[in-house]
Image (cartoon, helix red, strand yellow):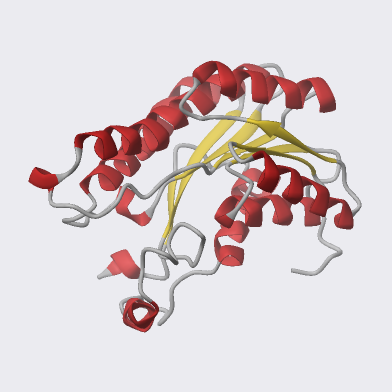
Amino acid sequence: MANSIRRYEGRVVTVIGGGSGLGEGFANRFAREGASVAVLDLDATRGNAVAASLSSYGVAAMYSHVDVTDAESVVSGVDAVVERFGKLDVAVNSAGIGGGMHLLTEFPLEAWKQTIMVNLVGMFHCLRAEVPHMEANGGSIINIASMVGAVAHPLTSAYVASKHGVVGLTRSAALKWGHKQIRINAVGPTYVRTPLTVPAIPEEVWPELDAEHALGRCATIDDIAGVVAFLGSDDASIVTGAFYLADAGYTAR
């Protein structure tokens, strides 16, 4: 994207899970487009590093500690952003875990509970903290789901269930808060090379995954960041309650 496109001048964006992977990519994209960006993450070292790096775009940035499994931690983290910048225009909820690959009947109970807690209950905590700050002037919330919010995989039942839940939660919230001009949408990325996926997927498997997509490749972080930046912008002013599959045609089969 050309540096001259700065749709987010004067706007405040939070990225929960912004310390690495897709979240870090989102933080960079919004900063590049002129937003003041708050990086909210469990990892203070990574979160502070990403926030510091955003100064290269000539924007204000901050880090705030958040544990999405703790409702009050999320409220405190989001409140700190509004205290610093005075408002919240766009919120991206990107924190999540994979949960591992197991048969349903052999899925470790604690791993199942943790996946649902982080990916789905954590998303509820994020929405609960963000919506009150947008009720007066509207805003845009983008929840990061997955393409398995629309399809499934036999060995990732916890992840699939959590991401289907995120899509339903997004639509329910969009119906409730649309009258306040709060737009709430979800994005379903396909496979992306991130710190979450690279350790879990052997290098020799990636070419096979590329071939399963209509475009002949998996997504990049920049690909997904482009979709998220669109949904947060005025270009998507009529879009709410949507689930955008950013999957290179994987689910079109």
Q: Residue at x 34, y 76 (%)?
A: 209
| Image position, residue 58 (x, y; %) | 91, 52
Q: Is residue 131 visible?
A: no
Q: Camera-side residue: 113 or 185?
A: 113
6 lies above or below 17:
below
User: Count the marks: how many?
Assistant: 0
| Image position, residue 173 (x, y; %) | 45, 26
117 lies above or below 6:
above
Q: Camera-side residue: 116 or 183?
A: 116
Residue 168 falls left or right of residue 21: left
Q: Residue at x 86, y 56 (%)?
A: 57
Q: Residue at x 30, y 77 (%)?
A: 212
Residue 204 falls left or right of residue 35: left
| Image position, residue 40 (x, y; %) | 65, 36
- Residue at far right of view: 58
Residue 185 falls left or right of residue 159: right
| Image position, residue 63 (x, y; %) | 74, 37
Q: Is residue 93 visible?
A: yes
Residue 225 falls left or right of residue 11: left
Q: Camera-side residue: 108 or 239?
A: 108
Image quarter where the C terminus lies is bottom left
